[in-house]
Image (cartoon, grey):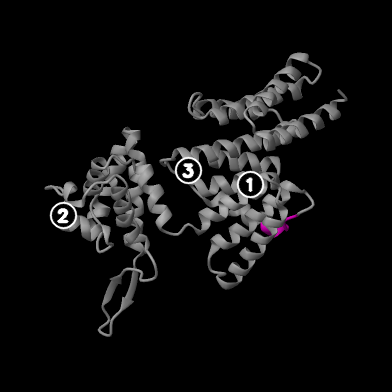
Amino acid sequence: MEQLLLKALPTLEKISSNFSLLSPFLIVYKSMVRLYNRKSEKTTKKGKINRIFEIKGISMDQSFGAAIKKLRLAKGIEAKAIASPIISYSQLLKFENGQNLITVEKLSYILNFINISPQEFEHVRFGLSDTKNFLFDVQVEEAFWHKNTAKLKRLLQDTKEELSLHPENKRNYLNLLEIKAVLHRINSKNKLSKKEIISLTHYLSSVKTWSNYEAWLFLNSVELFSDSQLKELVDSMIHPKVPSIITNNTQSKINTALLNVISIFIQSKHFSPIPDWFSYLDKHIHSDIDMYERAILAYHKALFEYRQDPKSDVNINQVEKCISAFEILGCFDLVNMMLEEFQSYKKESQI
């Protein structure tokens, strides 16, 4: 099975480069390949290597079939109805019960039969596997927006304990830096050590192609870096060294991270790189689909013009209109942050 998966991967990558709709499916398929390579191994007394599935809970391998079963039942479709020359009834049941994996052709057939997109499948599969880091990121984000420092400090303590138990897990250390960075965003008195900032910079700089996690980590730590470091990291983020397929979710994180960097450069009046970044965002934010990001971009463009000419009534009115739009939408936490930012700039310009 491993050889079959690996053999099909280059062909699928080539096809996906021409047909964007296949990109999400390639992500799912690559997960299958990685999981086959990561299966547990144990040595028998005769020195042979036997591959085994994880026994505790639902293993990552089992989550593929478990997700299909959950989605199939949710659609009210019997397993026998899916059986065909492409995949037999017994093959489907074994796959759903975690006894084997299937080819990309069979998985594609099942998803099409039950009318489920690759994104929906991956979302459900992810929910059946390890959601620990996902829930961690959600908690950090919610705590930031509500400026819940008590919650963040609790998460920080939990992460320190997890790091002491599993120091070999680099993700635990990165989670630690992420929380400290978010605490710094809320209150600049919360500092990270020089060593921690260097570690964070080194990690982000070493990644050839950023995934959702790197964009999220950078998004929460942009205020820790100098302008020159930010320019280098932004370049790595939006111009990957290795061509990749970026999901919509990852692109959204990249857009938000870049908007945060633009905000810092507007504050420091380091205007020169901003127009090029605006151009990038214009190309990667869809006007009708990503309305929130488009609105944030419009706010930053208005703020950019205001900072260059703070005495212009037109520029002042444009910023106020943008803030008012978010107020109408009920984004009050964001409105408060914008008002605080705008008032500080007015005070600086003595307006």
Q: Which mark is residue 220?
A: 1
Residue type indicated by callout 2: Tyr
Q: Secondary structure at mark 2?
A: helix
Depth order, front residue of 6/127: 127
Q: Position of residue 25 (x, y in %)?
A: 33, 43
Q: Residues within 10 Å of mark 1 (few under 14, many from 20)?
A: many
Q: Which mark is residue 241?
A: 3
Depth order, front residue of 186/97: 97
Depth order, front residue of 138/179: 138
Taking the view exactly as shown, the residue that stands out farthest to the right is 350
- Can you see residue 118? yes
Q: Quadrant of residue 231?
A: top right
Indicate which disc, 3 or 1, sits on the residue closer to the N terminus.
Answer: 1
- Does the magenta segment cover residue 193? yes
Which stretch did the figure color magenta? 191-196
- Can you see residue 1? no
Which one is closest to the eye, mark 1 or mark 2? 2
Residue type indicated by callout 3: Lys
Taking the view exactly as shown, the residue that stands out farthest to the left is 85
